[in-house]
């Protein structure tokens, strides 16, 4: 009977412990790696020299564009679809995702829209250090 008491407390405390990680303050930091750009059919490939934990992509450009698809290269060097933005977007535009990769492909399958992507920035997260002085 004593064992059952401990099992009853697990569903109560497990969500509390998991939610504590969600409430820690985090901030986005620009990934400081050189990014190589390569033009491919319908889009661009942005590659880094080593894998990074990408949490946010910021598209900088001009005008308005539509139908953007984001692909991430996985461990087997295959392109995995991550995000599809079917509507029109205006720049700057932020895309939130979770990916550990060394390359991201941005595809614009249609030519609708007058916009052009000039720069792509990749961000990761770090824990905010609180200073109590």
Image: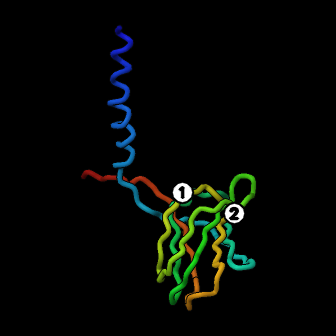
Q: Are marks 2 and 1 in contact (CB under 8 Å)?
A: no
Rendered location of residue 101, percent (x, y)? 64, 58
Dot label at residue 62: none
Q: Residue at x 34, y 31 (%)?
A: 13
Q: Report the residue that reaches farthest toward the left.
A: 133
Q: 110 or 61: which is nearer to us?
A: 110
Check the image and tell me how it is coloured.
rainbow
Rendered location of residue 47, percent (x, y)? 68, 68
N-term-proximal mark, 2 vs 1 = 2
Which secondary structure lies at badge 1? strand
Q: 87 or 16: which is nearer to us?
A: 87
Q: Is residue 55 above or below residue 113?
A: above
- Which label sits in the foreground, 2 or 1? 1
Rendered location of residue 73, percent (x, y)? 68, 60
**Which class describes the residues within 10 Å of circle 2: few (<14), some (14-19), or many (20+)?**
few
Determine whether, in the image, residue 110 is placed left or right of residue 61.
right
- The CA distance from mark 2 to mark 1 is 19 Å
Which secondary structure lies at badge 2? strand
Specify the quadrant of the image occupied by residue 79: bottom right
Q: 103 or 85: which is nearer to us?
A: 85
Q: Quadrant of the N terminus?
A: top left
Q: Is residue 17 above or below residue 125?
A: above
**Which class describes the residues within 10 Å of circle 1: few (<14), some (14-19), or many (20+)?**
few
Q: Is residue 15 above or below residue 46?
A: above
Specify the quadrant of the image occupied by residue 99: bottom right
Residue picked out by circle 1: 98
Residue picked out by circle 2: 49
Q: Residue at x 56, y 65 (%)?
A: 83
């Amino acid at each position: 009977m004593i064992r059952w008491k401990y099992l009853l407390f697990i569903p109560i405390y497990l969500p509390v412990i998991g939610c504590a990680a969600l409430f820690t303050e985090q901030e986005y930091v620009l990934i400081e790696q050189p990014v190589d750009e390569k033009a491919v059919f319908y889009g661009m490939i942005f590659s880094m020299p080593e894998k990074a934990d990408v949490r946010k992509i910021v598209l900088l450009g001009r005008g308005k564009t539509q139908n953007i698809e984001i692909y991430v290269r996985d461990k087997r060097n295959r392109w995995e679809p991550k995000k599809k933005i079917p509507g029109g977007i205006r720049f700057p535009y932020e895309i939130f995702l979770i990916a550990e990769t060394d390359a991201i492909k941005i595809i614009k399958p249609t030519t609708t829209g007058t916009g052009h992507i000039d720069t792509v920035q990749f961000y990761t997260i770090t824990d905010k250090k609180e200073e109590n002085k």
